[in-house]
Amino acid sequence: MIKFNHVFKIYEKNIKALEDINFSISKGEFVFLTGPSGAGKTTILNLLYREDIPDMGSVFVNNEDISHISDRKLPFYRRNIGFVFQDFKLLFDRTVFDNIALPLVITKTEKKFIKNKVEEYINKTGLCGKEKLTPWHLSGGEKQKVAIARAFITNPSLILADEPTGNLDDESSWEIIKMFEEVNKEGTTILFATHNKELLQKMNKRVIRLNKGKVISDESI
Amino acid sequence: MKVFKEVFLNFKKSGFMNLISVGTIAITIIILGSYFIANLAVNHFLSRVENKIEIVVFLKDGFAAEKMKNTITELESLNEIEDVKFISKYDAYQEFVKDKEILTILQSFESNPLPDSIKIKLKEYTPKNIDKIINILKSKEGIEEIQYGGKEIENLLNILNVIKIIMIVIGIIFIISSLLVVSNIIKLTIYARRQDIYIFKMVGATNFFIKMPFILEGIIHGFFGGIIGWVILYVIINILLTEIKKETGLDFTGFYVFTPSFFSLKFLIETIIAGILLGFFGSLLSLGNIKEK
Ligand SMILES: Nc1ncnc2c1ncn2[C@@H]1O[C@H](COP(=O)(O)OP(=O)(O)OP(=O)(O)O)[C@@H](O)[C@H]1O
Ligand SMILES: [Mg+2]
């Protein structure tokens, strides 16, 4: 489903964020992406989301080189992907409810359906009672939960998660992980970037390790 | 209806900017409206001047009017000509004797001293058209004299044409500059919301979906700007007219530009449409490249 083929990403001032990255992920896999800060995890996820384009090499999703997706088609490509951003990217002048509903609102989904869906994910992520608050009034962990609920709400076939448990206590971390496992069982492909060694060990999944923009190991623990 | 929610959020986020945008459109409408009135007045004046201009051809005495028929039909068939009128010396006499003083002068003659004549009205009084007609007439027999005001009329016509062109240029400059102001203000409101726009793109919103609220915003600004501009223009003109009446006793309210029909529903609707178009194109302009984050 996903294939990185000799991908390079170089930022100005010659920062080599990614250097000759090669890996494939099949449909339905649950893969962790790990490595120290600045290793290039977010960069890989951004390339997959077509928020950025590689300077060399290609990124394939469903056998399509995604650099070639036109600006017009890009929104529709993104609608198949749920992205939990490291910095959440929430709308601060809207309520928790509206933030979670956003991916459905932009596709003109029926109101009642949206309401049910949002309530379902508010329950799953443990945000009950916070529906009407704006992100200003949420803790870091709560904002992260909103970002997660928003990524899940469209039932995407691919979920990209950038440190989705970084701000959560152990208990809610496991609640969230359970959500990921659940959709993974139903066939959703997951690419999960994390620093959390304990999580990697407990989960026993494939782990791609990065360091300074290179893949240093790719194995199942 | 979602789109109205977006517009409302825009308004909350950059309320002051909205006021500036509406204000700019209102000012533009006032300027365009005054320009429109001035233009109407100038054109009215110009057409009155042009209506007074005619070419008069005096025919030789004793020259059979019959022979002039061909010339008249030839003139009538020309595109440049609005109207050709033959005035016999008898008709001219009847016209002149209406004036008592002229009557006594005319009565001192044994017979009717007035010549037969032809009055020619042109559709457009350009020097080129006048020249053409004069040349045709000069080639004909039986013509005593041609009167058309000569160089003075040509100069006046040239000046009037320059005034018309200047008015058009000023109008275009007004429209372009106000479009730029409005589009730049909407650009600022977009800038204030760039983070939100970026997030919308990040969850897969189409450009159309993102642009819609801003376009609607422009249209709403235009609507209110149009109404406010009209009200202010109405008040200004009314105060001016009453002041002029008080100071000079001249009543311009009857002048056709200022007749009540001018400040009618029709004109209000026209200003609102002008405002809406300004807001619409202004926002379209500012949304041209919404790509950057
Ligand atoms: N827009 C950018 N401009 C310049 N350099 C960038 C940009 N984005 C990332 N980088 C650089 O690319 C490298 C990889 O960054 P990236 O965000 O992918 O790291 P990461 O693995 O996600 O780190 P972290 O665990 O801290 O989130 C870093 O050295 C970073 O400074
Ligand atoms: Mg990162």
Image (spheres, rainbow, N blue to C red):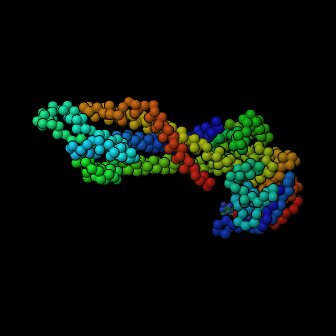
- In this rendering, position of residue B102 left or right of residue A36: left
Residue at 82% from the left image edge and 52% from the top image edge: A190
How many discs mark residues in the rendered view?
A: 0
- In which quadrant will I find the N terminus of chain A? bottom right
Between B14 and B283, the one lying in front of the other is B283
Q: Residue furthest bottom?
A: A14
- In which quadrant will I find the C terminus of chain A? bottom right
Between A62 and B87, the one lying in front of the other is B87
Q: Position of residue B198 (x, y in %)?
A: 64, 50
- In this rendering, position of residue A5 left or right of residue B169: right
Residue at 88% from the left image edge and 55% from the top image edge: A204
Q: Position of residue B84 (x, y in %)?
A: 33, 41
**Residue B276 at least partly seen:** yes
Q: Position of residue B44 (x, y in %)?
A: 34, 40
Q: Is residue B31 above or below residue A8?
A: above
Residue at 55% from the left image edge and 50% from the top image edge: B286
Between A146 and B119, the one lying in front of the other is B119
Q: Position of residue A64 (x, y in %)?
A: 78, 58
- In this rendering, position of residue B101 left or right of residue B127: left
**Residue B163 at least partly seen:** no
Q: Residue furthest left?
A: B108
- In this rendering, position of residue A18 left or right of residue B44: right
Residue at 75% from the left image edge and 47% from the top image edge: A151
Q: Is residue A116 above or below residue B57?
A: above
Q: Quadrant of residue A216?
A: bottom right
